[in-house]
């Protein structure tokens, strides 16, 4: 019965914890970005964007040479199919960070996310709490190293080529490009670096002496907290939000999308699609199968992927009996 709550996402306004989470994420993002620049200019090595199936012609934005503009990309179902935190959970299970019981929950959450396409705050919070309990006591450097491996194993093949091309267009115009996600900032930074992006805004987990405590700084970077993170980073970087762009698939990111002068709905859920059309925002859809109305059950090409996730859950449940 608890799962029914995921069907009714709640809109929240920014709170003190949202602001704290946003500011902490912006600080972490700038620090990691500077470290990447000192190590190597990876953006110059990024592969050129590929044309995604059904991709629209290149937009007349971004403006080349506009150093007061930047682009902010949501990660889950915008840049990458599925949720990063769940792929990360699969990788940690493979490395025996936790037992099969927790994997069943991760598998079910990922299957639900793929089927419904709904980012419910409580649902994502549950996944975040699971991850925090799993990494408590581990070193940050250890998780960063493992994150590199997990990216290759589960994430690289799930990057949407169309969205990747949009990000590359901003890079080619000389602008910075940031991921903005509820995933842990360390994992988000790995993904951003592997894609040749500037850096990432993500959920900041507290660490002391380089060891995770199992607590968050503020709250997960979700909904209003994302907007606060973008606002804080823009202020620190001297950006003008009216000249910036933001991309997301979820209505939960409307606060972030509403901050910038160039909002894009990418693979949008039903609520965001409606909201975007009412405001004449640009839409892009790179999915191979269009989702059915309202319930969001994938059509044609998406069914196999969902069935695979659901079958994994069922198989694990049978083994437990």
Image (cartoon, rainbow, N blue to C red):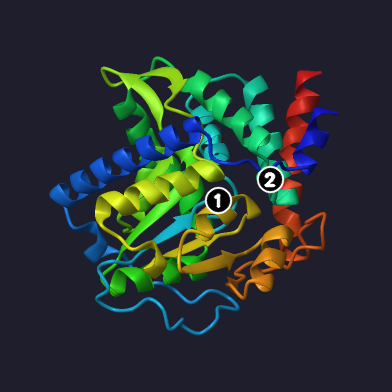
- Front residue of 214/191: it is 214
> Image quadrant for the N terminus?
top right
The numbered disc on residue 244 is: none
Q: Answer with the quarter of the image where residue 289 lies.
A: bottom right
Are there few (<14), some (14-19), or many (20+) residues within 10 Å of tag 1?
Answer: many
Residue for point 39% across, 14% down: 137
- Front residue of 76/273: it is 273
Q: Going by the picture, which residue comes out furthest to the left? A: 38
**Residue 91: x and y, percent?**
50, 34
Q: Going by the picture, which residue comes out furthest to the right? A: 1
How far apart are the alpha carbons under marks 2 and 1?
10 Å
The numbered disc on residue 113 is: 2
Q: How many marks?
A: 2
**Residue 196: x and y, percent?**
31, 59
- Element type at mark 1: loop
| Whether label 2 touches label 1, CB < 8 Å | yes
Residue for point 49% across, 49% down: 155
Considering only vertical position in the picture, is 101 above or below 87?
Answer: above
Q: Which residue is mark 1?
A: 76
Circle nearer the N terminus (2, 1) = 1
Considering only vertical position in the picture, is 84 above or below 300?
Answer: above
Answer with left or right where residue 263 lies relative to residue 149.
Answer: right
- Element type at mark 2: helix
Are there few (<14), some (14-19), or many (20+) residues within 10 Å of tag 2?
Answer: many
- Front residue of 87/128: it is 128
> Image quadrant for the C terminus?
top right
């Amino acid at each position: 019965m608890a799962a029914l709550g995921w069907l009714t996402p709640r809109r929240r306004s920014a709170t003190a914890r949202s602001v704290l989470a946003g500011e902490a994420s912006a600080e972490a993002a700038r620090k990691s970005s500077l470290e990447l620049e000192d190590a190597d200019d990876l953006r110059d090595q990024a592969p050129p964007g590929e044309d995604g199936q059904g991709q629209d012609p290149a937009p007349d934005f971004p403006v080349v040479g506009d150093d007061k503009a930047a682009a902010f990309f949501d990660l889950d179902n915008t840049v990458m199919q599925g949720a990063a935190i769940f792929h990360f959970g699969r990788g940690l299970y493979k490395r025996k960070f936790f037992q099969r019981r927790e994997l069943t929950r991760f598998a079910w959450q990922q299957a639900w996310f793929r089927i419904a396409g709904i980012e419910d705050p409580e649902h994502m919070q549950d996944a975040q709490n699971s991850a925090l309990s799993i990494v408590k006591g581990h070193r940050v450097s250890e998780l960063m190293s493992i994150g590199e491996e997990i990216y290759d194993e589960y994430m690289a093949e799930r990057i949407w080529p169309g969205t990747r091309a949009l990000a590359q267009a901003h890079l080619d115009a000389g602008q910075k490009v940031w991921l903005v996600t509820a995933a842990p900032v360390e994992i988000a930074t790995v993904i951003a670096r592997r894609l040749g992006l500037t850096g990432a805004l993500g959920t900041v987990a507290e660490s002391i002496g380089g060891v995770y405590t199992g607590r968050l700084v503020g709250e997960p970077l979700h909904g209003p907290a994302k907007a606060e993170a973008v606002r804080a980073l823009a202020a620190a970087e001297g950006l003008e939000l009216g000249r910036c762009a933001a991309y997301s698939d979820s209505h939960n990111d409307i606060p972030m999308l509403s901050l910038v002068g160039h909002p894009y709905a990418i693979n949008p859920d039903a609520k965001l699609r409606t909201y975007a059309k009412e405001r004449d925002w640009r839409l892009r859809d790179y999915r191979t199968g269009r989702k059915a109305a309202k319930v969001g059950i994938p059509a044609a090409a998406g069914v196999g992927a969902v069935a695979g996730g659901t079958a994994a859950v069922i198989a694990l449940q049978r083994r437990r009996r």
